[in-house]
Amino acid sequence: MNIAIVCEYNPFHFGHLYQIEQIKNIFPKANIIAVMSGNVVQRGEFSILDKLYKTKIALEYGIDCVIEIPSVFSLQSAENFSRYAIKIIDAIKCDYISFGIESEIEDLISYKDFILENEDEIVNYIISNKNNSYNKNVIDYSKKNYSNYSEEIFKSNNILALEYMKALNKLKSNCKILPVKRVNSDYNSDSIENISYSASSIRYNLSSLDNFKDNVPHLTYHYLKNYPIISNQKILDILSYKLLVKNSEFYDITGFENGLDNLLVKGFDGGYDEFFENIKNKKYSKNRLKRLIFNYILDINKNFIDDILSEDIEAIRLLGFKKNFDLSSINKICKICSLNRDFLKLSDKYKKLFEYDIKVSRLLYSTKMVNDFYDFPLIKK
């Protein structure tokens, strides 16, 4: 039996370990497969650790196999991020998907059904309230029309859980759900008191890492101490060049709406954090703007996203596995891609998809010509 966890491990903490332990308590003999973001994450930033170290940590703490979510989809909305992750899970024929939740699963299933049943009306509501963000419009519509509305529903882990379940329905997946109730901490908390169970808290308090080294898994501490990624500032430098010097078009970029290019121009005053404080507003959250900028820098076209999402998965990118893991158990209806010779056998469309991962790595390690298929070797434990 194979059980999937969609994750970012940005970075891995004791809450992630708790989820793995809960799965093993229920299914002791199952393989656990991490379907994981690589060098960029859905917040629209570089991961705090590169995918090489994230894979090593995952395999050390109970994951049996790590498959990368392509950078293209790590940089999309929660809906498209979740949809592609579920397509991976279906392609490798996982029996269950496990995800963290912050409410009772029955409440989330009920709300998911409400969203699916009223999808057309919600779209019309969003169109008629263009000055509000997508999330605010969904919340407002739900307040007015969902009898069991609760603000608890819209906690971060719940939102992703809802998107996974919606994707399972829409794709008519046979994969079952295995939710795990989150413990001890709010997902987005920066408080040091929550550091054992909050990736946000770890990132926020990284400068005082030594003070809480016993509150994070040992290997996480080791890699954060020695190899953290603090590279987001360079994204603004590239944006400035592309937007103000080259005047590159935004029109076909995924996530773009008219006027967003002008909004970005207003932000160039100060550092990375100040930039997003200058331009965020009630319609565009910081994370959405960060994703847009990455998509713009990488030239990720909306039509390309739609094309990939509309087709069966051709190949998956394998990052690592335990030596006793049977790779044939995931090689069902798609190719496993881990080496350069695998890459060369792909269709042009999937070569382009994985070439974005190479571009992201070159952005991250801009002092050398990185090629993922040479410089990020397959990890075997």
Image (cartoon, rainbow, N blue to C red):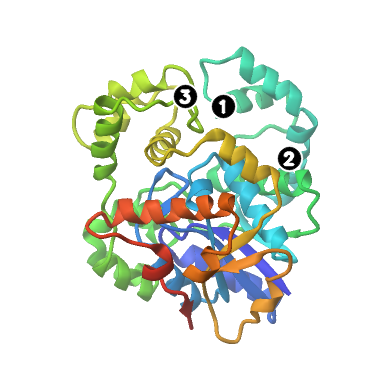
Dot 1 amino acid type: Tyr
Residue occupied by mark 2: 112
How many neighbours does mark 2 have within 10 angstroms: few (below 14), some (14-19), or many (20 or more)? Answer: some
Give the residue at mark 1: 134
Tell me what residue is drawn at x 62 percent, y 50 percent.
84
**Tag 1 secondary structure:** helix
Q: Is 110 left or right of 160, judged from the image as shown?
A: right
Q: Where is mark 3, residue-wise? A: 251
Most extreme residue toward the left is 270
Q: Position of residue 19 (x, y in %)?
A: 58, 66
Q: What element does badge 2 sit on?
A: helix
Instruction: Measuring from the top left, give residue 353's x and y in whole percent.
Output: 53, 51
Q: Residue at x 62, y 61 (%)?
A: 315
The tag earlier along the polypeptide, 2 or 1, is 2
Question: Which amino acid lies under the numbered mark 2 shown in the image of this protein?
Answer: Lys
User: What is the CA distance from the residue labelled 2 to the residue labelled 1?
Assistant: 16 Å
